[in-house]
Amino acid sequence: MPSKWGLLRIFCKFRAKIEEPALSCRDCKPPHQPSSRTSVKKSLVAIASALVICSPAAFAATPVPSADPAVVAATKQMLASMKIRDVMQASLKQADQQMPTQIAASMNAMIDSDATLSAEKKADAHKKLQEALPTLTAQMHGVFSDPTLVDDMLAEMVPLYAETYTLDEIRQLSAFYASPLGQKMLANMPTLMTRSMEISNRVMMPRVQKMMAQSAQSIVGK
């Protein structure tokens, strides 16, 4: 089973490839010229840092007060009526299929928007990214297909719901999710979440890429 830190390691390996000296002599490059490889490296370091920030170690579990056992039992029953395990597994499957493409698009955009890279260096960076993607995709699949992932998330969700809702409210929610409308909502939730994310990316990414390009131009112009 690949480690959940696999993604970070792959990015670090890709960063190391970018850092490999292209010339046998350091003096072959004028000292005043900015390093194109260093620019790509910084972009990859930013992504790797984001992975660290989003890792379980960064998000330490917030202690949840002990809940009433009756509320906990009702919460588990409600989650069962929600078929939450099936919903979460479907969402993870979709993420497993889409995340590699989204990460590749984001990293390619970062390379393209880097004003310090020549066309040749950009082509080289794109090539190295394509070489790293199969291993990255395999590592990501290991994370999303880990059978303990849903179990761990559900273990955290039960006390959260039990702390947020009263026993009566949990029972009302359970009745709703067991109803035809509640079942329809749950059945459509993965698709709604996926399409909502696609809308968010479609609206947001051009703005982010424009901002990144402007920032790169501003930095280079200084």
Image (cartoon, rainbow, N blue to C red):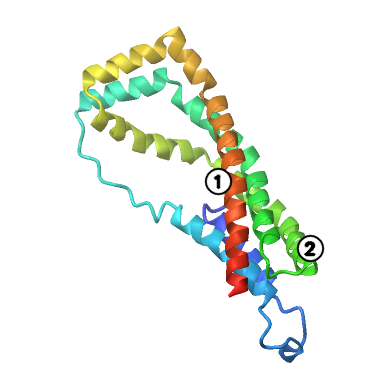
Q: Nearer the viewer, mark 1 or mark 2?
A: 2
Is residue 20 positioned above or below 64 on the image?
A: below
Is residue 173 positioned above or below 144 on the image?
A: above
* Residue 196, numbered label: none
* Residue 123, numbered label: 2
Give left or right: position of 156 versus 64.
right
Give left or right: position of 176 versus 116.
left
Q: First in sequence, mark 1 or 2: give its number.
A: 2
Most extreme residue toward the bottom is 27
Q: Residues within 10 Å of mark 1 (few under 14, many from 20)?
A: many
Quadrant hosting residue 219:
bottom right
Real-space Cα distance between discs 1 and 2?
A: 30 Å
Give left or right: position of 219 versus 158.
right
Place of residue 49 in the rendered image (x, y in percent of width and height, measured from the top left)? 50, 61
The secondary element bearing badge 2 is classed as: helix
Is residue 126 positioned above or below 65 on the image?
A: below
* Residue 143, numbered label: 1
